[in-house]
Amino acid sequence: MKNRIFSGVQPTGNLHLGNYLGAIRNWVRLQKDFDCIFCMVDMHAITVWQDPKELTSNTRMVTAGLLAAGIDPRNCIVFNQSQVFAHAQLAWIFNCVARLGWLNRMTQFKEKAGKQRENASVGLYAYPNLMAADILAYKATHVPVGEDQKQHLELTRDIAQKFNNDFGVEFFPLPEPQILGEATRVMSLRDGSKKMSKSEPSDYSRINLTDGPDLIADKIRKARTDPHPLPDSIAELEKRPEADNLLGIYAALADMGREQALARFAGAQFSDFKAQLTDLAVASLGPIGEEMQRLVRDTSHVDKVLREGAERANALAEPIVRQAMEIVGFLKA
Ligand code: AQP
């Protein structure tokens, strides 16, 4: 049996370069060697307010992004989370397995709730338990994600371990994170200390997969940098977050190591480097963006992919979650 991958993306806005380099491009490469399940996690999305119409259209758009990037729904399962009830059922069990102390350590909740902690939804706090359920409902063994999700993956392993210990079973596997490539944490183009994110108000903080060449060029031109030429050592680069971010993006898009990219641009002015980065970004993302726009207009195709994916996902998850319910001691009707 091939190892099984589960990974998800929130339909909270347009896909950006961080989602692509940190996650989706790796998924495309892994689909040959693993059984893959890719999920539009709409139940995670509503942990912060989503306009219902936008949630529907974003779910289609994010699905279109996966397909345009090269995810093949004939080989992989592609679906939206809310269509498969097993996720919510298992999440409730995990709400009762995970400890408050564990969730209190989650940095994503702290960042997203910010100073409005008392006003954050209960769902935002319990988000990592639902994520554990997403993965373990399929007994997935590997989870390709960006660096930002590493802590949630560790929590998933803790939950699986505690469930197995509490009930004296070897039921859930402890899934391995796969954090791959040179751009595991792509930062905002406006602030090298913040990650590139769909929900950041400034569109100029990110490159969206649907941005055309002129907009990509403008965003890269206006990306924050410092006045010095690019350095010649990684140690120097790491002291300059914005330069480090742009060079990391270049290396990832060119499929080369950071050292190799730095050797190419050591001593270069940002204007020259940015022009080459723009050409590379346009060449890499342009075809994906165009295909995405085409698929977004073909809603019946996208909906069919999601419907068929949900049926296949349900067939895998339902028996696993049913067994978990029996282990817990829930009486079968
Ligand atoms: N900046 C990033 N760099 C590298 N990887 C990233 N990912 C997200 N941002 C970056 C990875 O993309 C996958 C899908 O992420 P998500 O949409 O489920 O959630 P997120 O991490 O909360 O992404 P956003 O874009 O920041 O969304 P909002 O603004 O709604 O919170 C994950 O594998 C993630 O690691």
Image: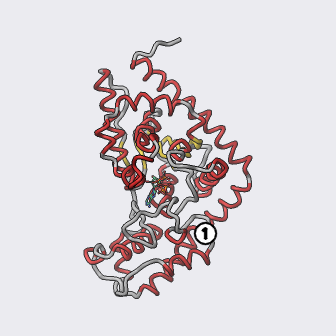
Which residue is pictured at 51% across the width and 68% down the height?
206
Label 1 sits on a secondary structure element that is loop
Which residue is pictured at 33% across the width and 73% down the height?
259
Asked whether, in this view, residue 124 is left or right of residue 40, the answer is left
Q: Residue 75's quadrant in the figure? A: top right
Q: Residue 133 at x, y = what percent?
A: 44, 35
- Number of numbered markers: 1
Most extreme residue toward the left is 235
Q: Residue 312 at x, y = what percent?
A: 59, 34
Classed neighbour count for the residue bearing mark 1: other residues with Cα under 10 Å, few (<14), some (14–19), many (≥20): some
Which residue is pictured at 47% across the width and 26% down the height?
321
Q: Nearer the viewer, residue 74 or 201?
A: 201
Q: In the picture shown, does residue 177 fall above or below 222?
A: above
Q: Residue 164 at x, y = what percent?
A: 32, 26
Asked whether, in this view, residue 317 is left or right of residue 153, the answer is right
Q: Residue 308's quadrant in the figure? A: top right
Asked whether, in this view, residue 23 is left or right of residue 290, the answer is left
Residue of label 1: 211
Q: In the picture shown, does residue 278 fall above or below 72?
A: below
Q: Residue 179 at x, y = what percent?
A: 38, 54
Which residue is pictured at 59% across the width and 42% down the height?
79
On whether ligand 1 comes within 8 Å of the CB at mark 1, the answer is no
Q: In the picture shown, does residue 142 fall above or below 139?
A: below
Q: Residue 193's quadrant in the figure? A: bottom left
Looking at the rendered structure, the kind of residue marked 1 is Asp
Q: Nearer the viewer, residue 15 or 286?
A: 15
Q: Nearer the viewer, residue 160 or 97?
A: 97
Asked whether, in this view, residue 276 is left or right of residue 288, the answer is left
Q: Quadrant of the N terminus?
A: top left
Indicate the colouring scheme.
secondary structure
